[in-house]
Image (tube, rainbow, N blue to C red):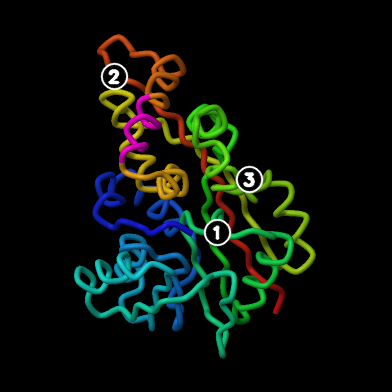
Amino acid sequence: MHSWDAGRYLRFAGERTQPAIDLVARIDLEAPRRVVDLGCGPGNSTAILKARWPDSELTGIDTSADMLAEARRTHGGITFEQGDIAAWRPAARYDLVFSNAAVQWVGDHERLVPRLLAMVAAGGRLAVQMPRNHDFATHALMRRVAAEGPWRDRLEGARDPSPVKPPEFYYDLLAPHCERMVLWETNYIQVMPGVAAIIDWLRGTGLGPFLARLNPAEQPDFLARYETLLAGAFPPRSDGKVLLPYPRLFFIATPKG
C-alpha cells in the first residue's frame, strides 16, 4: 500500500465527508456504547460519529501514521489506533462497526464482510460505504496510462481490481445472518473547475498506488497523459466546469440476536 497524505486527502474534505454524513443519518441506534470507525483516515468520519453519539466509547482505526497523526491533532476525545482492517479481530464486539470509503481497499469481501458482521454485538449495526467506480472513466483511463507508457512493467499490479461487488452480492452474503438489512446507492455528481481538479481529487486516493511506483521525473508525464484522456471523457459544461460522477454503495446490517 502506498503512503497516504492527509493534507492532500483533506483538500476535498467536504466531498469526502458527505457520504459518511448520509450513512450516519440512517443508522437507527439510540446510544451505542462502543463504536469503531474502520479506515478512519484523518478522523473526518469519526468526528461525525462523535457528534451523533458524544457519550460513546469511540475508536478510529487506520493503517496510515500520517492520517492518524492528523486525526489525533484535530479530533480530541477519540481514541485513534493503527491497525489493518484485513487483520482486525477485536477482543470484544462493538455496538456499531462503521466504515466509510475504506473496505474497498481490502480484498476477499466474501470472507471479510461476514467477519465484520460477526464483530457486531447483539442489537448493533454494521454500517459500510464504498465507492463503486472502478470501471468508470476515471479509473479505466488511469489503468490505460499505466499499461501504455514506458513504466508499464513497474505499474503492472499497482492496483488490484476493486473487490467491491453489486448490492445483490452483499445482500445474499449477509441476509441469512441478519434480522434486517438495508442497501442503497447514491451517485454524487461533483462539480469540478476542470480535469486538473479531478486529478487533484484522485491523487489523494486512486492515483496514489501508481504514482508511488514512479520516480519524481516520471510523474508529470504520467499525469499529463492522464489529463489528456480525462479531457476527452469529461468535456466542459456550459459554464466551463466539469461534472464528476461518483457512485457509492451503502449498507446497514443488523445481525441476528
State how far apart marks 1 and 2 are (Cα).
31 Å
Q: Name the amino acid, label 3.
A: Pro
State how far apart marks 3 and 2 are (Cα).
30 Å
Q: Indicate which disc, 1 or 2, sits on the residue closer to the N terminus.
A: 1
Residue 170 image point, x, y percent = 70, 54
Position of residue 58 in the picture relative to residue 8 (left or right): right
Q: How many marks?
A: 3
Corner quadrant of residue 238: top left
Q: Residue furthest bottom?
A: 91
Queried whether the magenta region covers residue 219, the answer comes back as yes
Label 2 crowd (10 A; few <14 / some 14-19 / many >=20): some
Residue underneath mark 3:
161
Residue at position x 59%, y 55% in the image = 251
Query: Given this view, does label 3 or label 2 mark the residue nearer the observer?
Result: 3
Instruction: For the residues labelled 1 and 3, say whether their Cβ atoms are less than 8 Å apart.
Output: no
Label 3 crowd (10 A; few <14 / some 14-19 / many >=20): few
Magenta segment:
217-224
Corner quadrant of residue 216: top left
Judging from the image, what secondary structure is the residue with disc 3 in?
loop
Residue underneath mark 2:
241
Judging from the image, what secondary structure is the residue with disc 2 in?
loop
Please state which of residues 191 and 10 is positioned toward the viewer in this rendering.
10
Residue underneath mark 1:
103
Corner quadrant of residue 15: top left
State how far apart marks 1 and 3 are (Cα).
13 Å
Please state which of residues 54 and 91 is positioned toward the viewer in this rendering.
91
Q: Name the amino acid, label 1.
A: Val
* Quarter placement of the C terminus: bottom right
Residue at position x 59%, y 81% in the image = 89
